[in-house]
Image: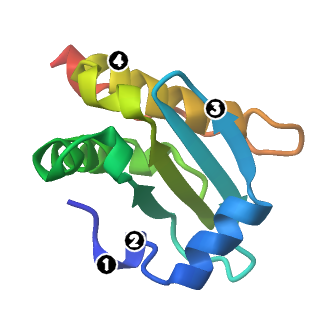
Amino acid sequence: MLAGANRITSGDDYKMVVRRGVRVVGPHLVAYLRRNPDGEPVRFGFIVAKNVGNAVRRNRVRRRLKAASFSLLPSVRPGTDVVIRALPSANDVSWPELYSEVEGALAKYQRQPGTPRIDPAPNPMNR
């Protein structure tokens, strides 16, 4: 479970990250990443719209995204805001595939020029 300090709760913060952040598109999700000028800890936000499915399916996708984000939290550079928007196909994807897609989006953002390299978090799939 993500701590309160690691969650984006303000609508204005969501808008700022989505509108001005770097977009990384995958087959099942779109990740928006932006450096937070305040230097706060890493914060995550999630958008799971009704086109993903009914409430049960949306909450399942949201819980999976939160679990993946929690596992990857140590590998993200401090001061980064991340908003993950689930696409309708995220409902049918397996957990390992969803996890690797979130991990890939974060890694792609951190590979940009001028970004310090941080070692990836251990993969919970290898336990």
* Spatial CA span between label 1 and label 3: 26 Å
Q: Comparing marks 1 and 4, which lies closer to the viewer?
A: 4
At label 1, counting other C-alpha atoms closer than 10 Å, the crowd grade (few under 14, some 14-19, many 20 or more) is few
Q: Earlier in the sequence, mark 4 or mark 2?
A: 2
| Vertical order, 6 against 66 (above or below) | below
Q: Comparing marks 1 and 3, which lies closer to the viewer?
A: 3
Q: Which residue is mark 2?
A: 7
Q: Which residue is mark 1?
A: 4
Asked if marks 2 and 3 touch (Cβ < 8 Å), the reply is no
Instruction: Report the amino acid beneath label 1.
Output: Gly
Asked if marks 1 and 2 touch (Cβ < 8 Å), the reply is yes
At label 3, counting other C-alpha atoms closer than 10 Å, the crowd grade (few under 14, some 14-19, many 20 or more) is some
| Horizontal and vertical percent position of residue 8 | 46, 73
Q: Comparing marks 2 and 3, which lies closer to the viewer?
A: 3
Q: Which residue is mark 3?
A: 25
- Which residue lies most toward the left here? 56
Q: Earlier in the sequence, mark 1 or mark 3?
A: 1
Instruction: Report the amino acid beneath label 4.
Output: Glu
Instruction: Report the amino acid beneath label 3.
Output: Val
Q: Earlier in the sequence, mark 1 or mark 4?
A: 1
| Vertical order, 79 against 65 (above or below) | below
Q: Earlier in the sequence, mark 2 or mark 3?
A: 2
| Horizontal and vertical percent position of residue 68 | 32, 40
Q: Earlier in the sequence, mark 4 or mark 3?
A: 3
Q: Which residue is mark 4?
A: 97
* Spatial CA span between label 2 and label 3: 21 Å
* Spatial CA span between label 1 and label 2: 5 Å
At label 4, counting other C-alpha atoms closer than 10 Å, the crowd grade (few under 14, some 14-19, many 20 or more) is few
Q: Residue at x 45, y 61 (%)?
A: 44
Q: Residue at x 64, y 72 (%)?
A: 15
